[in-house]
Image (cartoon, helix red, strand yellow):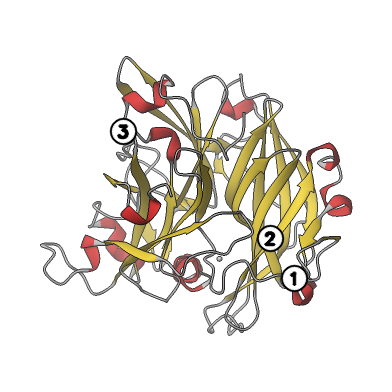
Amino acid sequence: MKSLCKWIAASILAITSTASVFAKDQPHFDCGPSFSLQAPWEGADAAYSVPLGDGRDVWIFGDTLFGKDRQVKGNEPEMVHNSFGISSCMDGQWKLDYSIKRDAKGQFSSYFSPQRNDGTYYWALDGVEHNRELWITLVCVRNKPQSDAFALGFEVCGTDLARVSGLDQDPQNWKISYYPLVAESVHANPSASTLIQGDYLYIFTMYEKGARPQILTRIPLKGLDDPQKHLQYRGADDQWHDGLEPEKAKVIMKTGASEMSVRYHPELNKWVAVMVDPQIFSDKVIFRTAPSMTGPWSDGEVIYKIPELQKTFNKYDPDTFCYAGKEHPEFEKGDLVFTYVCNTMKPKKLESEPNIYFPQVVRMPMPATGAAK
């Protein structure tokens, strides 16, 4: 049941530089992403992509099913809380290698795990490459029966930042360091979308109050070794302030999403945000634009209706819900590429329905609202 709570929460919490669009001679443009099940990797959610300077992409996956096939014991799928994928594109051929961490005993485990042995775990979300290292946002989660989070049995316990070194080695040998970022008491989680612009690492941050607006935080790149000390937020006065006081922050988006992408498109002269509509159990993918990272952001255009949620879909199931919408500009050719993930409210169905719970890829024309002005 814990995993079910996490999956529903993903909808409800709506919880080189990645801000650039790659030159058209980059190898990414010759391929389209796809995510087939390859044992022991049997499906996952999240699916943030981080382009590396060497032409590869690192894919950050959330709760990851593993084994010879999918196994669910009661309502608890066999899974780890995060895993990686490494993709490349050579001569137009897409290749994706999944990687699930193995512990000292050879058992599958999560790449990211809190160091405090208190039963908490991490949902790994967006990240960037900086100086040949990855910086990845980590939302701390603990199980709590009858919690305030719609009585789903979990609660968020703050946000940390991970530093991943040794990217030229096998992912099993990557070195991970952890840095505290925001305490649980702040009730704002820098994690929804991460990018580098100029001398700063910017993180779109959901404020867990009221309509759950999106606010904006940043860390100077020179201060990443102590991100909590150097964290800043955009105030309602349109100035940057030290620390994070979300009640004094500027509302960047009136309603945000716990998972989304924000990327700058120089060919459009606009910032673009892609997400699944934050309204719980929505079937809509939303496209927002802004002239500046800080806004004003458009309310959003519905650019896609998720087929799996339409009653006319040949495999329609009322227990299915979808979330985790985000853009992957490094694979675009003047069009729009994004992914989303569908899941089920009845985890046992994962064993018999291999058509869900892995990233679905959509390539479509760039929406007219994205046209340059």
Question: How far apart are labels 2 and 3 at the CA level?
Answer: 31 Å
Return the x and y of residue 11 as percentages of the image width and height.
45, 69
Write down the residue under mark 1.
249
Q: Is residue 177 left or right of residue 327?
A: right
Q: Quadrant of residue 18?
A: top right
Q: What kind of element bears circle 2? A: strand
Q: What type is the residue that disc 3 sits on?
A: Gly
Up-down: is 24 above or below 176? above
**Is any atom of residue 95 visible in this view?**
no
Q: Is residue 249 left or right of residue 121?
A: right
Q: Residue furthest front?
A: 373
Of residues 133 and 142, the one drawn nearer to the viewer in this rendering: 133
Question: How far apart are labels 2 and 1 at the CA level?
Answer: 8 Å
Up-down: is 333 above or below 291? above
Is label 3 or label 1 in front?
A: 1
Local packing at callout 2 (Cα closer than 10 Å; few below 14, some 14-19, many 20+) is: many
**Is any atom of residue 51 visible in this view?**
yes
Q: What type is the residue that disc 1 sits on?
A: Ala
Write down the residue under mark 3.
32
Write down the residue under mark 2.
216
Give the tally of numbered discs.
Answer: 3
Local packing at callout 1 (Cα closer than 10 Å; few below 14, some 14-19, many 20+) is: many
Residue ID at (30%, 69%): 283
Q: Are marks 2 and 3 in contact (CB under 8 Å)?
A: no
